[in-house]
Image (spheres, helix red, strand yellow):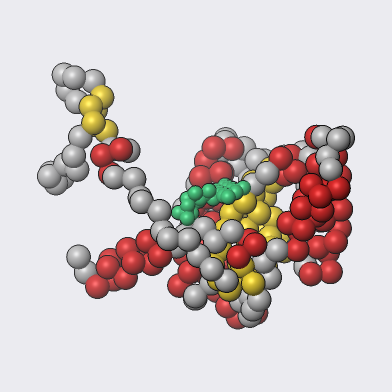
């Protein structure tokens, strides 16, 4: 393996989800943030649509998001206890940097479907996560039912074609879990064979 490949492999393996409650100040500074979010631009992007966008939730706007998390919870469960409502609100204040990740299902060439757009956005996110890791920051993607609530969609001024995919949090790592066991390649590698249909298999020896 080349030195570059070794470095990239180490970087990829050192990225892990650090949940927002374990991400504290300081977050990235302005220049670092430009580098981190700028890494998204190198993602494969069929039709060069830039179907993703990131919306930074400023410190000043966190209370608005907290209120929305509480409203979303109460819409789903009118019997939610005060402690559960507080917990829902508290999520808006975690991590020094919090962004909503949005995918546009319609911009540009409409022949490029939502699946492709989500794949591009996933690649963009992986670039962002790896760059944050390379700069020494922890990061997490988080989802949740609130993402689909009409109130959250209104808060972020989402249009009909917009999908709120997940939140992205970045910050300094307070503590981390031990890294997980990664799946073996044979769990996700298959071959189309001439005679036996699809078979699990090893990495082919090489290409012609
Ligand atoms: C789109 C997306 C949404 C996610 N949402 C959550 C979430 O809501 N809560 C959570 O604990 N982890 C969430 N994760 C993180 C995964 O659970 C995590 O990537 C997985 O467990 C593998 O761990 P690792 O990232 O440390 O390798 C999300 C990941 C993705 C890609």
Is 80 placed left or right of 104 in the picture? right
Q: Is residue 85 above or below residue 28?
A: above
Q: Which residue is nearer to you in this view: 58 or 88?
A: 88
Q: Nearer the viewer, residue 159 or 91?
A: 91
User: Looking at the picture, how far across and down is residue 30, in whole percent?
Assistant: 65, 79
Q: Is residue 13 visible?
A: yes
Residue ID at (50%, 65%): 176
Number of disc labels:
0
Task: Using the rendered view, name the quadrant where residue 112 is placed.
Answer: top right
Relative side of 115 to 187, left or right: right
Quarter-wise, where is residue 5 in the image?
bottom left
Horizontally, residue 201 falls left or right of residue 112, namely: left
Which of 46 and 161 lies nearest the eye of the viewer? 161
Q: Considering the image in quadrants, where does the C terminus appear? A: top left
Taking 169 as reference, is 80 above or below it?
Answer: above
Image check: 184 left or right of 80? Answer: left
Name the spot of residue 151 as percent of width and height, x first: 85, 44
Q: Nearer the viewer, residue 92 or 29?
A: 92
Residue at point 49% right, 75% down?
Answer: 136
Q: In which quarter of the image is residue 61?
A: bottom right
Tell me if I can see residue 162 in this picture: no
Relative image position of residue 65 (x, y in whole percent) = 81, 56
Q: Position of residue 110 (x, y in %)?
A: 62, 37
Residue at image location 16% in from the left, 19% down from the top: 195
In this view, 130 is above or below 122: below
Please name the residue shown 20% across and 65% down the image. 1
């Amino acid at each position: 393996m080349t030195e570059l490949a070794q470095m990239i492999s180490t970087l990829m393996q050192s990225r892990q989800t650090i949940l927002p409650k374990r991400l504290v100040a300081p977050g990235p500074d302005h220049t670092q943030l430009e580098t981190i979010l700028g890494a998204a631009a190198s993602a494969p992007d069929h039709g060069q649509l830039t179907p993703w966008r990131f919306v930074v939730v400023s410190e000043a706007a966190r209370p608005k998001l907290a209120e929305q998390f509480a409203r979303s919870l109460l819409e789903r469960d009118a019997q939610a206890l005060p402690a559960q409502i507080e917990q829902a609100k508290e999520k808006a204040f975690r991590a020094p940097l919090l962004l909503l990740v949005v995918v546009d299902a319609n911009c540009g060439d409409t022949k490029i479907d939502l699946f492709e757009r989500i794949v591009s956005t996933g690649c963009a996110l992986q670039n962002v996560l790896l760059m944050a890791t390379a700069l020494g920051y922890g990061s997490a993607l988080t989802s949740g039912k609130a993402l689909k609530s009409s109130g959250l969609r209104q808060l972020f001024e989402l249009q009909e074609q917009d999908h709120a995919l997940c939140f992205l949090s970045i910050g300094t790592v307070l503590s981390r879990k031990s890294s997980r066991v990664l799946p073996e390649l044979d769990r996700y590698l298959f071959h189309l064979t001439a005679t036996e249909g699809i078979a699990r298999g090893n990495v082919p020896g090489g290409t012609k």
